[in-house]
Image (tube, rainbow, N blue to C red):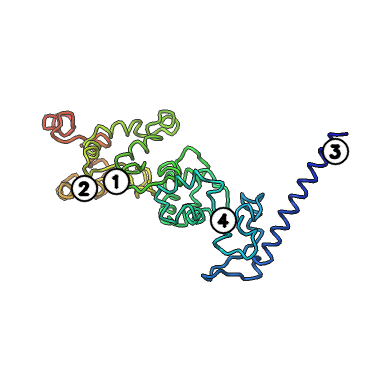
């Protein structure tokens, strides 16, 4: 009997709470319903369609859970403002040192709303680029037609998403930042999460099984570690619109390799383009050698290195 009474009291309390929340929402909507056309002192619309909140991850929260200051009569936009820090202090702390802090001060929730919206806050889908497209539309479009984007579009969870390369959105850093996972110094390890993974290499039959390890020994990687500008993964393969070498649009397809290398090696390219090899490739003879045919791909070494395939004692006896 006592248990029945106790359960009844709990149920009654929950019903009363729900009624209070509903009443509070009704009170707010008496001014903030879309039909009122209410604007603030800056002319910004401050109305709400309740359906937006019902479709939000915050649907179980009442207005006053976020806008506590609105409980006071005669509240202003400032006293009734919501702060995401109340429930998400860690995210705000991470965001403050992120490149996305430029979207607005985390403590005012400006940055949060720039990506998540205000009332109709959707739960971020794993690996979704939907939140990024508002500011990064060209990059998202390029990614959607890339080998990675197409794989994700088919539901392949092994393919990388924005955060797999750039890091979590709250901690994203500019590529020029030495701590960014897409900084030239760190990019090989970032790409290596997938491309040096033996299980993925076997599953998808990667043409190069250990490209990162080979690259790290190259003249390019050593130059970057020394603080010099040299080719990193994205300089040859592209960034968001990466395509397989078998695609004629790819910067590393046989017909395009020399042009890609020319971005850094312009003088050498002009010599190659006029050679019998260069003219043959330009004419569509894909059996003719291009840069990588002689110098290698990821493990390119300086011609002065005895291990280089174009070292003086190797070039004629081995490579050619």
Mark 2 or mark 3, which has the lower sequence index? 3
Quadrant position of residue 181: top left
Q: Report if the CB atoms under discs 3 and 4 are less than 8 Å apart.
A: no
Name the residue tied to disc 1: 235
**Spatial CA span between label 2 and label 3:** 81 Å
Of residues 163 and 115, the one drawn nearer to the viewer in this rendering: 115
Q: Report if the CB atoms under discs 2 and 1 are less than 8 Å apart.
A: yes
Mark 1 or mark 4, which has the lower sequence index? 4
- SS state under label 2: loop
- Whether residue 273 is visible here, answered yes or no, is no
- SS state under label 1: helix
Single out the mark in the foreground, 4 or 2.
4
Quadrant of the frame with the C terminus? top left
Q: Residue at x 42, y 47 (%)?
A: 146
**Spatial CA span between label 3 and label 1:** 72 Å
Single out the mark in the foreground, 1 or 4.
4
**Spatial CA span between label 3 and label 4:** 39 Å
Name the residue tied to disc 2: 264
Single out the mark in the foreground, 3 or 1.
3
Mark 2 or mark 1, which has the lower sequence index? 1
Name the residue tied to disc 4: 82
- SS state under label 3: helix
Q: x, y (%) of residue 141? A: 44, 54
**Spatial CA span between label 4 and label 2:** 51 Å
Of residues 319 and 203, the one drawn nearer to the viewer in this rendering: 203
Q: Residue at x 67, y 49 (%)?
A: 60
- Whether residue 44 is visible here, answered yes or no, is yes
Mark 3 or mark 1, which has the lower sequence index? 3
Residue 269 relative to residue 72: left or right: left
Q: x, y (%) of residue 226? A: 21, 38
Name the residue tied to disc 3: 5
Quadrant position of residue 6: top right
């Amino acid at each position: 009997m006592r248990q029945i009474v106790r359960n009844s009291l709990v149920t009654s309390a929950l019903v009363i709470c729900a009624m209070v929340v509903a009443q509070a929402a009704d009170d707010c909507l008496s001014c903030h319903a879309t039909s009122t056309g209410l604007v603030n002192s800056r002319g910004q619309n401050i109305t709400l369609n309740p359906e937006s909140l019902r479709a939000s991850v915050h649907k179980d929260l009442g207005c006053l859970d976020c806008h506590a200051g609105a409980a006071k009569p005669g509240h202003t936009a400032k006293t009734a403002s919501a702060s995401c820090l109340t429930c998400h202090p860690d995210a705000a702390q991470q965001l403050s040192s992120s490149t996305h802090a430029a979207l607005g001060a985390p403590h005012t929730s400006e940055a949060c709303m720039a990506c998540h919206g205000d009332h109709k806050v959707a739960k971020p889908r794993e690996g979704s680029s939907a939140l990024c497209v508002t500011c990064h539309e060209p990059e998202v479009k390029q990614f959607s037609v890339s080998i990675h984007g197409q794989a994700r579009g088919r539901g392949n969870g092994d393919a990388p998403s924005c955060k797999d390369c750039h890091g979590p959105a709250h901690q994203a850093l500019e590529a020029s930042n030495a701590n960014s996972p897409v900084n030239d110094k760190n990019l090989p390890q970032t790409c290596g999460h997938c491309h040096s993974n033996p299980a993925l290499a076997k599953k998808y039959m990667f043409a190069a099984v250990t490209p990162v390890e080979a690259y790290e020994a190259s003249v390019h990687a050593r130059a970057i570690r020394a603080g010099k500008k040299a080719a990193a993964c994205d300089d040859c393969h592209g960034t968001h619109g990466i395509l397989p070498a078998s695609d004629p649009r790819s910067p590393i397809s046989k017909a395009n390799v020399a042009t890609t290398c020319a971005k850094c090696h312009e003088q050498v390219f002009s010599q190659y383009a006029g050679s019998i090899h260069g003219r043959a490739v330009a004419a569509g003879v894909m059996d003719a050698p291009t840069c990588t045919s002689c110098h290698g791909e990821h493990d390119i070494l300086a011609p002065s290195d005895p291990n280089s395939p174009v070292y003086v004692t190797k070039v004629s006896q081995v490579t050619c």
